[in-house]
Image (cartoon, rainbow, N blue to C red):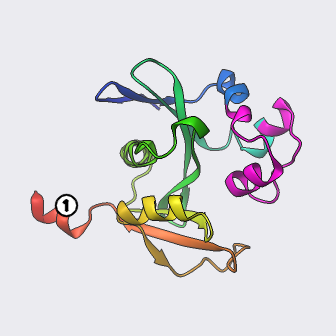
Amino acid sequence: MGMLTRDGWTLREAGSSDIEALMQWFPTHDDINVWGGPSFRYPFTCETFFEDVYWEKMASFCLSSPCGDLVAFGQLYDRDNRIHLARLVVAPGMRGQGLGRRLIEMLMEQGKKLYPRDEYSLFVFRDNIPAYECYRALGFRVSEYPKDMPHADVCYYLTRPEFLEEERNAS
């Protein structure tokens, strides 16, 4: 799958050794529910976490700082002919520093290498205002909720074209 490096930050394929670090980021049932959804088991073990995050079924990536610290995680897969970003998270002590934006930008770049699509998508809980604002700032817009997905009453479905109009005009 490859690795991306930008300004010393590295997006790399996640390894099984990252699971224990990720597990520490979700100390409560509410934390894991917001991130992994209501079917994510809690309390979890390494084994159930591995299964519930679909580790072997989705492209999973970690963002590492210039010092090599794991600071964010996200997954990619093809959903309805879009590059779908899933289970996006920044380490609790690192939030509010623009790392969500960095993670998403690098995941979108990696996604173009994995899937020949020209649009991105993601889900976000409506009450997760910081994440929603981050996605909106990156050009994601609320779209029609997929009919086959639960939680339409509590989540938004956001999409974004590969290139925003201002990005097209700048080229």
Q: Quickly name the residue at label 1.
A: 167
Q: Position of residue 97 (x, y in %)?
A: 42, 42
Q: Residues in magenta?
A: 22-49
Q: Position of residue 139 (x, y in %)?
A: 35, 65
Image vertical order of residue 24 relative to residue 96, above or below: above
Task: Identify the image quadrant of the C terminus.
Answer: bottom left
Image vertical order of residue 94 relative to residue 126, above or below: above
Describe residue 39's horizontal placement relative to residue 97 as left or right.
right
Describe residue 79's horizontal placement relative to residue 100 as left or right.
right
Describe residue 149's horizontal placement relative to residue 170 as left or right.
right
Image vertical order of residue 71 relative to residue 138, above or below: above
Q: Position of residue 158 (x, y in %)?
A: 49, 70
Residue shown at the point (63%, 69%) measured from the top left = 127
User: In the rendered structure, which amino acid carries the disc numbered 1?
Assistant: Glu
Quadrant of residue 120 within the rendered picture: bottom left
Label tally = 1
Q: Nearer the viewer, residue 45 or 24?
A: 24
Point out the residue furthest to the top here. 67
* Helix, strand or loop at mark 1: helix
Describe residue 51's horizontal placement relative to residue 128 as left or right.
right
Q: Nearer the viewer, residue 69 or 106?
A: 69
Decide whether residue 27 is among the magenta residues.
yes
Q: Nearer the viewer, residue 37 or 65?
A: 65
Decide whether residue 55 is among the magenta residues.
no
Residue shown at the point (78%, 54%) measured from the top left = 30
